[in-house]
Image: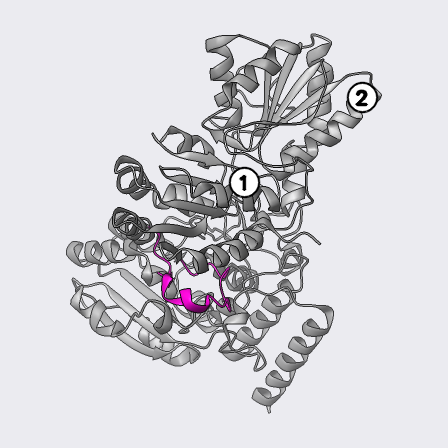
Amino acid sequence: MTPPARVAYRDLLIQLMACDDRIYCLDTDTGLFTGTDFGAAAGRYVNLGIAEHNLMGTAAGLAASGKIPFVNTMATFATTRALEAVKLDIAYAGLPVRIVATHGGLAAGHLGPTHHSLEDLAIMRALPGFTVVVPADAEAAREAVAQSLEVPGPVYIRLGRSATPPIGAGPTTLGQAQRLRSGGDIAIFTCGPHPALAALRAGDQLARHGVEAAVINMHTVKPLDTAAVLAEAGRVRALITVEEHWRCGGLGGLIAETLCEHAPARLVRIGMPETFAQVAGDQSYLLDYYGISEQEITTAALTLLSDGTITGGTRDDPDLSRV
Amino acid sequence: MSPVAIADRVREHIVDMCASPDGGHLGGSLSLVEILTTLYFEVLRVDPRDPAAADRDILILSKGHGALALYAVLAERGFIGVSELRTFGQPGGRLMGHPTRAVPGVEMPTGALGHGLALGNGFALANRGRRCFVVLGDGELQEGSVWEAAMGAASLGLDNLTAVVDRNGLQLGSPTEATVSLEPLADRWRAFGWTVREVDGHDPAALAEAFRPVEPGRPAVVLATTVKGHGLPFLQGRPESHFAKLSERQHARARAVLRARQARSAS
């Protein structure tokens, strides 16, 4: 059984801390480290309590002193509650803090909008110097964490909550897109586990309709693998982006910006429509309810290829452009 | 119904909701029960038939993870149907793990910690003739924004504002004092310009007394000493009670314990 990505990350971090005494683990009463044995590195695990601004400032101070802090909180608290400290103390100061944010997207499920994180990618990719990574499975999370040690600037790694199956992408290299499936009719760009899995299932469904869909895993949202995006765009008739994020400003926005500047193309962005979750339900229910799903991708692809009119999703979203 | 009987019913509802498929915040809801039942049944001027009444008192549950206690009390008080509690966390329902304004009686959405006291400042400032209560968790006091709001309320002289701290001593993973120490808590609030009342948070009569109107010109804080998981001896006082998905067996055991407790208090 594959562990949740956050557990895989935790176990790797403990190993890394044993080998490198510059590495600190800063916690905010997340529970992820409860009962964990850090061994000789125990002094470098610090639980700062429920205080995220202090978390980010403390991390910046440690990083400015030559340490390598990994900070732990939920994605929404990392990127909205503590944003000014992230922007100024970490990004502006250019310090190599690693923010490992759990409960990305709708992972908190029935806990509701206070615990959902649907804007973090838009925020984090706007901050100069940040590397932004959304691993699509536990192995990719491990590789992102290990490779983050070679990144000179700050890194944001967005993880989920529950276990998800491996996506079968092979080795991950930060900054390099991964083609999970080949196809010449339409290209589907995804980030994160649920969008990737939904896109792969949609690819199978589309094949039964005679449509060959490529699925590209954009685990590194920033810096974007622009060459891969343009290469795929040049091979297909239309493109779709899928993300567990509001449609505004995340992977879809990023790819739209890139295409507009280099090679305008037909694109539909699938993501959370412009609303806070209005209903309770677990993550998979909410993903389906809001159309971040295999069916939505399939419908969008078939409509695009038949030159039909389509919005960014079946749910009305007047603020977003219609294709 | 006596305050004790109401609290017993609320505890049963909380336990039932924690047996739902995705579970809920059990311990910190059970510690809140007498605080919320006393406020809603003895203190607050509210009308379940008119939740938006212009002269109502305001309650903000800043520790939004205590939603189960709030929903159960709102149901017992008549704001929502008791039967709706069965939909907690369920697909398509409105009872999420943290309170939303879609639920009658909920003034503000909460769940991210450290927001409620500043919201209370705004309500208290806008409505000087009405009382505003803000219920906070003790772990929540580690958020710096609480202390910005505390300074602000004293500076504004918001004597219609009362903060209530559910001092159960435990946060998610460990005791508050072993995480980031809060003590000496009463002295800290006093130093910020607040009148402090310390009370047993499971004693309805003592709570009602502590919630009486405060000194002119000063906000008040009620430090209510409670037990996380109160009412379930096999969980109470343990950090593991923070969030629970009760199995069928655990649910039956919890209900049996609560029923025995009710029988004892009735006899």
The mark found on residue B98 in the picture is none
Mark 2 belongs to which amino acid?
Ala
Quarter of the image for the N terminus of chain B: give it: bottom right
The part of the image, by quadrant, that contains residue B167 is bottom left
- On screen, residue A302 versus residue B239, left or right, reads right
Q: Position of residue B56 (x, y in %)?
A: 38, 54
Q: Residues within 10 Å of mark 2 (few under 14, many from 20)?
A: few
**Residue beneath label 2, please?**
A207
Q: Residues within 10 Å of mark 1 (few under 14, many from 20)?
A: many
Whether residue B137 is visible, yes or no, is no
Q: Earlier in the sequence, mark 1 or mark 2?
A: 1
* SS under mark 1: loop
Which residue is found at the position 33% from the left and 77% from the top?
A: B209
Mark 1 or 2, closer to the camera: 2
Quarter of the image for the C terminus of chain B: give it: bottom right
Mark 1 belongs to which amino acid?
Gly
Q: Position of residue A308 (x, y in %)?
A: 69, 10
Q: Is residue A307 above or below residue B246?
A: above
The colour scheme applied to this rendered structure is one colour
Does residue A48 show up magenta in the picture?
yes
Which residue is found at the position 32% from the left and 49% from the top?
A: A56
Tag 1 and tag 2 share a subunit: yes
The chain that hosts pointer 1 is A
Mark 1–mark 2 distance (CA, rounded to whole Å): 29 Å
**Residue beneath label 1, please?**
A105
